[in-house]
C-alpha cells in the first residue's frame, strides 16, 4: 500500500482511536478503583464514569463503516461530550459546589437529535465536528473556571497544571475546527495522515495528563488534610502544641543564630506604645476550669474551650499565633509589639472572654483568665526558657487572685 491509499489512512486513524478508547477505559478503572477505596470521595466516581463514557464513545467511533451511522456518529460523539461533562461535575463535587438540576441531562438527547435530523448542522462532517469541538471547548472553559475556584478557595497548586492542559485542549479544538473548514470532508480519511495523527496524539496525551492531574489533585487535597489534622487541635481548631512550638521556633531562629533580631520598623496597627517593638509570648489558663467540668459536665467544658479559642482568634491579629498546650492551657505568640501593646492585647483577650462566657447558656456564670506575658527581646533564649518564664508570671497571676494579666519582665499588672 502507498501513503496515498485512503483505506490505509483510515486504518491508521481507527488504530489511534482504539488506543484512545483503551487508555480512557484504563483511566476509568483507575478512578473507579480509587473511589471504591474511598467511597466518600464521590467525585472520583464522576471522573471514572466520565472516562468510561468517553471510552465507549471512542470505541463506537472506531466502528465507523461496520456499524450504523446513527451509532458511530450521533451516539458516539454524544457519549464523548457527556464524558467530559461528567468530569466537570466531578470538579464541582470536588469543590463541594451544589449539584446541578436534572434538566441539564436533557441536553444530550437533544444533541443526538440535532446530529440526526436534517439540518445545516447535520449536513456534513465539517458542521458536525465543528459543533462537537465547540461543545467540548465550552465544557473545557467551564472546567478552567472551576479549577480557578478550587485554586482560590483551597490553594491546591496542581490546578494550575490542569488548567494549562485544558487550555491546550481548547487550542487543539480550535485548530481542528479551522483545519476542517480549510479541508471540507466527509470522513477523517479526507485529511492528510500526519495532521490526523498529530491531532489525535495531542488529544490522547492531554486526556491522559489531565486525568492523572485529577488524581494528583485528590492526593494534594488529602495530603493537606493530613497536615492540617496533624497540626490542629481537634476540639478548638487552633494549632496543637507541636505545631505551635514549631511555628514559634521558626520565629525565634534568627535570635538563636545571631543572638539578636532587628526591631520592626512598622508597628502593628493599634498596638504602638512607647517602647521598642519586639515579640511576646503569652501563657493562658482558664480559671477554675475543673469546677466547670465537675458542675456542668464535660460538654460544657468543651464548649468553654471552643468559646475561648473563638474569642481569642477574634481578639488577635493575623500575625499572631494561637495554640493549645493541653487541657485548659493555651499559648499565644505576638509578633511586633512593645510591652504596653502586649499587655493591651492580653487585657483585651481577658475582657472579651469574660464577656462571652457570661452569656453562655450552658454555664450561666462568667469565666475568667489568668495570663502570663513574657517579652522576647534580642536574645538567644530557647522556647523552653521563654515558656517557663511566662508560666512563672501566669502562676503569679493565679496566686494573686486570678483573673488578671501579669508581666514576666515587670511588676505591672492589670486586674479587675
Image (cartoon, grey):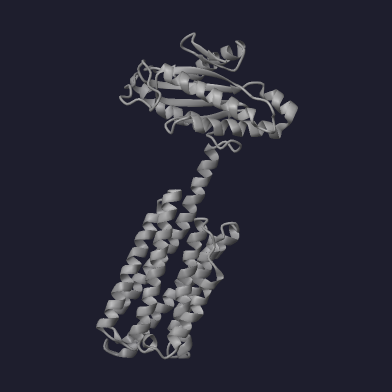
Q: Position of residue 26 (x, y in %)?
A: 49, 69
Nearest the viewer among 275 and 177 is 275
Residue at 70 percent of width and 35 percent of height: 299
Q: In x, y percent, where is residue 398?
A: 60, 14
Q: Is residue 9 visible?
A: no
Which residue is drawn at the image coordinates 35% and 79% (left, top)?
130
Numbered marks: total: 0
Work out which quarter of the rendered image holds the C terminus and state it.
top right
Spot the residue most to the top.
411
Q: Is residue 395 above or below residue 112?
A: above
Q: Residue at x 39, y 69 (%)?
A: 138
The correct choice, above or below, for 180 with respect to 392 in the image is below
Left or right: residue 115 versus residue 49 is left
| Nearest to the observer: residue 47 or residue 284 | 284
- In the rendered image, residue 220, in percent from the top left (x then y), is placed at 47, 51
Residue 50 percent location from the top left of the image: 50, 69
Quarter of the figure with residue 284 = top right
Say if residue 277 shows up in the picture: yes
Outermost residue to the right = 295
As displayed, is residue 90 above or below residue 188?
above
Q: Quadrant of the image for the N terminus? A: bottom left
Amino acid at each position: 500500500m502507498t501513503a496515498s491509499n485512503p483505506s490505509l489512512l483510515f486504518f491508521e486513524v481507527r488504530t489511534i482511536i482504539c488506543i484512545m478508547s483503551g487508555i480512557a477505559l484504563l483511566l476509568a478503572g483507575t478512578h473507579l478503583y480509587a473511589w471504591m477505596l474511598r467511597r466518600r470521595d464521590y467525585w472520583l466516581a464522576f471522573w471514572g464514569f466520565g472516562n468510561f463514557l468517553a471510552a465507549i464513545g471512542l470505541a463506537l467511533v472506531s466502528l465507523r463503516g461496520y456499524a450504523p451511522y446513527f451509532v458511530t456518529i450521533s451516539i458516539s460523539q454524544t457519549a464523548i461530550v457527556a464524558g467530559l461533562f461528567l468530569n466537570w461535575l466531578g470538579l464541582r463535587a470536588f469543590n463541594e459546589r451544589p449539584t446541578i438540576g436534572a434538566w441539564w441531562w436533557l441536553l444530550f438527547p437533544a444533541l443526538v437529535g440535532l446530529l440526526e435530523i436534517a439540518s445545516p448542522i447535520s449536513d456534513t462532517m465539517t458542521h458536525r465536528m465543528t459543533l462537537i469541538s465547540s461543545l467540548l471547548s465550552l465544557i473545557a472553559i467551564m472546567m478552567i473556571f472551576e479549577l480557578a475556584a478550587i485554586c482560590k478557595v483551597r490553594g491546591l497548586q496542581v490546578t494550575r497544571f490542569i488548567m494549562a492542559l485544558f487550555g491546550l485542549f481548547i487550542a487543539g479544538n480550535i485548530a481542528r475546527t479551522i483545519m476542517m473548514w480549510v479541508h471540507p470532508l466527509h470522513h477523517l480519511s479526507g485529511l492528510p495522515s500526519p495532521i490526523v495523527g498529530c491531532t489525535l496524539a495531542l488529544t490522547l496525551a492531554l486526556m491522559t495528563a489531565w486525568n492523572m492531574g485529577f488524581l494528583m489533585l485528590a492526593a494534594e487535597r488529602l495530603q493537606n488534610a493530613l497536615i492540617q489534622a496533624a497540626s490542629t487541635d481537634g476540639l478548638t481548631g487552633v494549632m496543637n502544641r507541636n505545631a505551635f512550638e514549631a511555628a514559634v521556633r521558626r520565629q525565634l531562629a534568627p535570635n538563636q543564630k545571631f543572638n539578636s533580631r532587628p526591631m520592626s520598623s512598622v508597628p502593628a496597627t493599634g498596638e504602638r506604645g512607647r517602647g521598642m517593638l519586639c515579640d511576646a509570648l503569652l501563657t493562658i489558663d482558664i480559671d477554675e476550669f475543673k469546677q466547670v467540668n465537675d458542675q456542668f459536665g464535660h460538654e460544657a467544658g468543651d464548649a468553654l474551650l471552643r468559646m475561648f479559642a473563638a474569642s481569642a482568634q477574634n481578639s488577635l491579629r493575623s500575625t499572631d499565633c494561637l495554640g493549645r498546650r493541653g487541657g485548659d492551657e493555651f499559648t499565644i505568640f505576638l509578633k511586633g509589639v512593645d510591652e504596653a501593646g502586649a499587655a493591651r492585647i492580653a487585657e483585651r483577650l481577658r475582657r472579651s472572654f469574660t464577656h462571652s462566657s457570661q452569656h453562655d447558656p450552658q454555664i450561666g456564670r462568667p469565666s475568667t483568665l489568668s495570663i502570663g506575658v513574657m517579652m522576647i527581646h534580642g536574645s538567644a533564649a530557647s522556647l523552653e526558657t521563654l515558656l517557663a518564664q511566662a508560666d512563672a508570671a501566669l502562676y503569679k497571676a493565679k496566686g494573686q487572685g486570678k483573673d488578671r494579666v501579669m508581666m514576666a519582665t515587670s511588676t505591672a499588672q492589670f486586674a479587675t
